[in-house]
Image (cartoon, grey):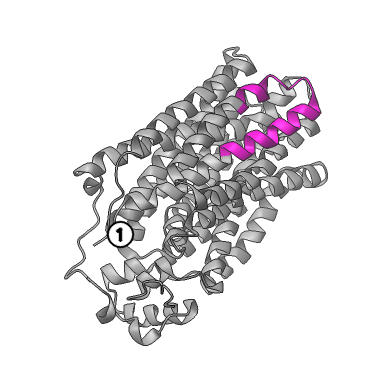
Amino acid sequence: MSQTVPRTRDLRSHLEHAPMSFYQWAIVACAVVLNANDGYDVAAMSFVSVNVEKEFALSGSELGTVISATLVGMAIGAFAIGRLADIVGRRWTVIGSAAVSTIGMFLAASSADVVQLGVWRVLTGLGVGGILASITVITSEFSSRRWRGLAIGLYAAGYGVGAFLGGIAANGLQETYGWRSVFLVGASVSVLVVLALVLFVPESVQFLVNRRPAYADRALRRIARRVGFDPERSSLADMVDLPDEAPASRLADLFRGRLLAITLLLWVAFFMVMFGFYFVNSWTPRLMIEAGMTTEQGVVIGMALAIGGAVGSVLYGVVAVRFSQESVLIAFLVLSTASIVVFVLSTGLLAVAFVLGVLTGLLVNGCIAGLYSVAPARYGTMTRATGVGSALAVGRIGAIFAPIAGGALIDAGWTNVALYSSAAALLLVGALAVTVLRRIPEVEDA
């Protein structure tokens, strides 16, 4: 009886259809660690916000602006560096962005005033935004079609793991060494992460094929050996249906034909989901204190969100292996809406709030994993990093407004129920955008 053999006409086809190698999973692991850095950094700011607020005598709006400083940098980095990755390559874009982020974290630990802190947080965010725009594409391309949803889910789970570690660091370091020590520890770990990137992260195969840099054949053969494919069949000359020339990647390409609808729907979904996500994660520790909890209990609830977030990303990936990625994402968005409302109504009971916090973090972080998984497949090779980077940039704009809007509405006297209910309503809008997106076919590569 004959056995079906996966289509492995060339290296690209091998990556798409063959079982994933240890090296491919190592790339996923690097992506998880990178996203954990993001989670640690963003969550650490929310966990130390009370001490920062006291030291610099900040209002709610001013504190929200400081929290958003990193997100401003992320938005700029995701868009600008995402464009750069399509031109110069994704490997060194990721490594360079990680180095910038590390420098920003070291400098934040030395901030003498709130202006310095804000500037260094923007620099940190610039690096993180560049990382996300590039590593999301690399993770997607080096994952097989079967396991891509799980790989992206694991990658997105890194945020929750990093946020959880940020909470532990905040509780363990602040009282003895001050809030600056939380950033110093994160920056020190980031140095090791940069070294790991240099050793493990490869260049994107699609970039090598389409841009054809001088080192392309050498890099393709090295990748082939690591993923278990014949390196002698991995030069540019061996690629099937290779285009005659690589067209330049332009932002305008995202608005041509059906890509116009795809781009706008992804922008709406990213904006709404990231607004809700960053509002819940940035303000929950502080709002729980206003609801009557102690500072330590507020941090515990913030950690509950992080624990749930780590589980939720993986859960999304597991479910997405068996069902449509868009359908799973829609389900997570609708359930997140209900969970957020029930969570804010439960804050009078710590144990119940903790459980619901885990559930809310699980569902909301699963939505982020879903967006990361769905977006790359919606663009062709040459517009992929630009498309994903632009969607991330728009999402970061939503993330930026979340802490600022939260601080302004708190100063205006909004209740916790009103704040969280508004965030939940935005997730419903995101669900509607993904529902429409699901009806549009994916773009096929040449």
* Nearer the observer, 195 or 176: 195
Residue at left 48%, top 76%?
Answer: 227
Residue at left 57%, top 31%?
Answer: 336
| Rendered location of residue 101, percent (x, y) | 53, 54
Q: What element does badge 1 sit on?
A: helix
* Nearer the observer, 407 or 437: 437
Question: In the displayed structure, would residue 259 be above or below residue 377?
Answer: above
* Residue 345 included in the magenta stretch of the image: yes
**Which residue is identified by label 1?**
381
Which amino acid is tagged 1?
A: Thr
Question: In the displayed structure, would residue 42 be above or below residue 194?
Answer: above
View extreme (left): residue = 244
Magenta-highlighted stretch: main secondary structure? Answer: helix
Which quarter shows the C terminus?
Answer: bottom left
Magenta stretch in the rendered image: 339-364
| Rendered location of residue 23, percent (x, y) | 53, 73
Residue at left 75%, top 32%?
Answer: 354
Residue at left 35%, top 45%?
Answer: 390
